[in-house]
Amino acid sequence: MSLPQGQEKARVVRSMFDRVAGRYDLVNRVMTFGLDVGWRRRAVRELHLPGGALVADLACGTGDLSTELLDAGYRAIGVDFSHGMLANATTRAPLVQADILRLPLADTSTDGITCGFALRNVTDLRTLVDELARVIRPGGRIALLETAEPEGPVMRLGHRVYFGRVVPLIGGALSDRAAYSYLPRSMAYLPPPAELVAMLREGGFGDAEREALTGGVAQLLVGTRR
Ligand SMILES: C[S@@+](CC[C@H](N)C(=O)[O-])C[C@H]1O[C@@H](n2cnc3c(N)ncnc32)[C@H](O)[C@@H]1O
């Protein structure tokens, strides 16, 4: 089955997250064995910004990363286009319903940006990178989390089976089978690691780097705005 593109993709993604919002956190914890909590904490640690810095958490969903930002002493603002996800958010951070490809934020208005597991979901990654570069101040930091495919053949095979077969079963039992079958398929939207890093470097984050997390099943992209 082909994956949706353009405005059709945005519509599908948004309504899918509206649908799964109520049990999104539960399914996350179960399918990652709770590892997602550590990944978010790690992303926040990699910001290395002064206390009180303003960090926009893009595609914040139910706000787990926004809460980690507050707990780390930052000011946080969450942005997401899914009303269902925002309505189910448990964070104390202020939340805004908006498209992260057209942020309602002024140029150079933020010190940092986080984005958890949404690079795959946007309709145009370059537009997102342009928005990151626009709203972040020079010297500001980004920390972007995303799922990934491990490089080693054994881990890769295990990951394919788990992600492609087991995750849709877990998602189906706890939430919505169609949504959690889309999840492994949506990996196809992601550019290879080197391309992702190059896109960030060319887009204004000259020192961008990628780190594989937990054997390569997740990745963290960090960088500093020139
Ligand atoms: C996999 S969830 C991640 C939620 C949260 N960041 C986390 O770490 O759990 C992806 C989120 O991206 C949001 N999203 C996808 N495309 C978006 C866009 N163009 N603008 C705003 N939000 C978007 C979805 O609504 C969804 O809440």
Image (tube, grey):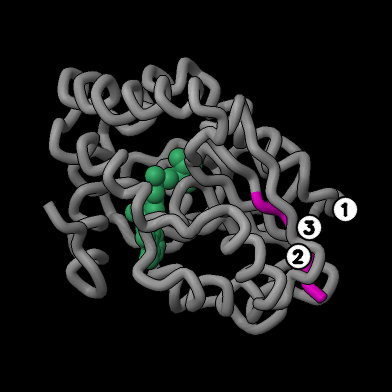
Give the left or right position of residue 52, taking residue 26 as reference.
right
Question: Taking the image as drawn, is residue 54 in sight?
Answer: no
What element does badge 2 sit on?
Answer: strand
First to last magenta residue range: 221-226
Q: Residue 40, position in %: x, y?
A: 61, 36
Identity, as a three-letter code, of the amino acid under mark 3: Ala
Q: Residues within 10 Å of mark 3 (few under 14, many from 20)?
A: some
Could you tell which of marks 3 and 2 lies nearer the N-terminus?
Answer: 3
Identity, as a three-letter code, of the amino acid under mark 1: Pro
Which dot marks residue 190? none
Identity, as a three-letter code, of the amino acid under mark 2: Asp
Which dot marks residue 111? 2
Q: Which residue sits at x=69%, y=42%? A: 211
Q: Mark 3 touching mark 1, by CB under 8 A? A: yes
Question: Taking the image as drawn, is residue 215 in sight?
Answer: yes
Q: Residue 94, position in %: x, y?
A: 53, 54
Q: Residues within 10 Å of mark 1 (few under 14, many from 20)?
A: few
Q: Which residue sits at x=85%, y=69%? A: 139
Splitting the image into 4 quarters, where does residue 172 fall? Answer: top left
Q: Which residue sits at x=66%, y=84%? A: 107
User: Is label 2 within 8 A of ligand 1 (CB to nearest ligand atom)?
Assistant: no
**65 or 92: which is nearer to us?**
65
User: Is label 3 within 8 A of ligand 1 (CB to nearest ligand atom)?
Assistant: no
Query: What residue is pinned by disc 1?
Result: 50
Give the left or right position of residue 156, taking residue 39 as reference.
left
Q: CA distance from mark 1 to mark 2?
A: 9 Å
**85 or 94: which is nearer to us?**
85
